[in-house]
Image (spheres, grey):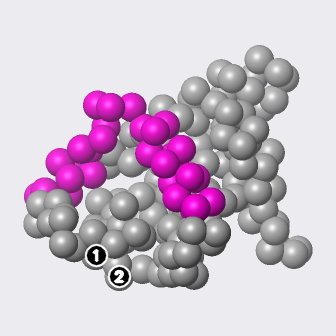
Amino acid sequence: RPLSLVQEVSLRRKAERSRLKMSVDFVLETFDPEEDDDELSNENLLRIIRSETSDQYVNELVWKCLGYTPREEDGSYSNEDVFPKWLEKYPSPPDLIGVTRNYTYEIDRPCQKANQQLVASIPMKYKQGVKEHLRPLGFTGFKLEELTPNKT
């Protein structure tokens, strides 16, 4: 079955990471799109967009896609597989959603900056990809009045 947009981008990024890290004698695990199928399916993306999942779930899914892996022994995250440029700025996985829903400048600004960095890393040709891929499932985008900080 065809890959979703997120799966395609994830595969391309993993290949890019592999090329970058192999240049410094680093070997990545192989990526199996079937393993992550449920998490990156169009149906699951639609659930995320409709706020049918927790903000923490979304953070953890994005962290996984960026290469952070949870350590079972203490719940912290390993950054061994994180994209090199991202790792420079974020050695620990940042809150990208604003799970506290506290939008004061001091608390929200780091989330906002991390989110902006993530959005800026998406190639322009994929910026409308979620909307295009989810249109067959009934998603037509957001109206301005529907937007909240965790939906941007």
- The three-letter code of the residue at mark 1 reads Arg
Instruction: Give the residue displayed 57% in from the left and 68% down from the top.
Output: 105
In this picture, residue 58 sits left or right of residue 1: right
Picture coordinates of residue 78, whole percent (x, y): 80, 56
In this picture, residue 28 sits left or right of residue 118: right
Is residue 139 positioned above or below 99 on the image? above
The circle on residue 52 is 2
Picture coordinates of residue 36, whole percent (x, y): 50, 57
114 inside magenta stretch: yes
Q: Quadrant of residue 75?
A: bottom right
In this picture, residue 2 sits left or right of residue 66: left
Instruction: Give the residue displayed 52% in from the left and 58% down from the top.
Output: 112
Q: Is the C-beta separation of discs 1 and 2 under 8 Å?
A: yes
Picture coordinates of residue 9, whole percent (x, y): 42, 39
Name the element at disc 2.
loop
Q: How many marks?
A: 2
Q: Quadrant of the C terminus?
A: bottom left
Instruction: Give the residue displayed 17% in from the left and 48% down from the top.
Output: 132
Q: Residue furthest top?
A: 23
124 inside magenta stretch: yes
Instruction: Give the residue displayed 72% in from the left and 49% down from the top.
Output: 90
Is residue 3 positioned above or below 149 on the image? above
Residue range corresponding to the magenta coloring: 109-136
Q: Main secondary structure of the magenta part?
A: helix
- The three-letter code of the residue at mark 2 reads Glu
Q: Is residue 47 visible?
A: no
The circle on residue 50 is 1
Distance in Å between CA atoms under marks 1 and 2: 5 Å
Q: Which residue is more in the foreground, 6 or 103?
A: 103
